[in-house]
Amino acid sequence: MKIILLGAPGAGKGTQAELLSEHLSIPTISTGNIIREELKSGTEIGLIAKEYIANGGLLPDEIVIKIIEERISKEDCKNGFILDGFPRTIPQAEALDKIGIIIDKVIDLEIKDETIIKRMSGRRVCEKCGASYHLKNNKPKEDGVCDKCKGTLVQREDDHPDTVKNRLKVYHEQTEPLKDYYKAQGKLNILEVDGRSIEDTQQMALSALEA
Ligand code: AP5
């Protein structure tokens, strides 16, 4: 199954992608995580990404499309995958269609901007594997340590309130139109998840995938 997770920054896409990946035994592809890896390794893409991430803007479409094309051509994607953070613009969605990728379902996590701003300040991510936690809602077993790989948990540079506000603005302008794009293809499933727990959200997502 090929799934796209849509939603504003902090809507819970990464969290749900990890859970769905375990449940469905298909990989999650997070463009955000791939780009952060490039940044950490100091590659050419990483150097370009630095400024965009710091401002909460989107990287140029052609760079991200190339990243995705390469990733989904790998062996582990042959039975499907979950896209977390891609597509984020209409040209990115058109590129997927153009290379012949048939998406089965698009799950859109709907949540209010105010809730997002509150959530982001509590998010901590593993600097090694990228797994996402929350100081209150999704605590690791041991403070500051990733349950999965024992890596150190840190706050993301772009989770500061001003950057989050800009990421939300970019989301409403450039990514939200994708809802209409996938609605027109009959693939959009809107889940109203504001105030829902991570577990409730997962149940809603699984029901939408089975429908
Ligand atoms: P990316 O990493 O994709 O950032 P994002 O979309 O802004 O998404 P987030 O990871 O911030 O949020 P999420 O929805 O995954 O939330 P999470 O599950 O962690 O991208 C980063 C940057 O890379 C972009 O700004 C851009 O510059 C660049 N980029 C990436 N893709 C690109 C593309 N395609 N094109 C161009 N540029 C691109 O949840 C958030 C917090 O809430 C966590 O702490 C979590 O534990 C908690 N939480 C989750 N669910 C719940 C719940 N139900 N109740 C309470 N708390 C919850």
Image (tube, grey):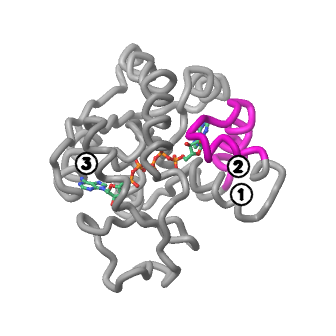
Compare marks 1 and 2 and give the one earlier in the sequence: 1
Magenta stretch mostly in which secondary structure? helix
Q: Nearer the viewer, residue 128 or 203?
A: 128
* Residue placed furthest toward the front: 162
Q: Nearer the viewer, residue 206 or 38?
A: 38
Residue that numbered label 1 is attached to: 39
- Going by the numbered disc 1, the residue's amino acid type is Leu
Packing grade of label 1 (10 A; few <14, some 14-19, many >=20) is some
The span from disc 1 to disc 2 (Cα, nearest Å) is 7 Å
Q: Quadrant of residue 110?
A: top left
The magenta segment is 48-74
Residue ID at (52%, 80%): 151
Residue ID at (32%, 44%): 116
Q: What secondary structure is marked by label 2?
A: helix
Q: Is mark 1 within 8 Å of ligand 1?
A: no
Q: Are marks 1 and 2 in contact (CB under 8 Å)?
A: yes
Q: What secondary structure is marked by label 1?
A: helix
Compare marks 3 and 1 and give the one earlier in the sequence: 1
**Percent x, y of residue 4:** 44, 38
- Going by the numbered disc 3, the residue's amino acid type is Leu
Compare marks 2 and 3 and give the one earlier in the sequence: 2
What numbered label is drawn on residue 206?
3
Q: Quadrant of residue 133?
A: bottom left
Residue ID at (24%, 64%): 137
Q: Are marks 3 and 1 in contact (CB under 8 Å)?
A: no
Packing grade of label 3 (10 A; few <14, some 14-19, many >=20) is some
| Quarter of the figure that contains the N terminus | top left
- Going by the numbered disc 2, the residue's amino acid type is Lys
Residue that numbered label 2 is attached to: 50
Q: What secondary structure is marked by label 3?
A: helix
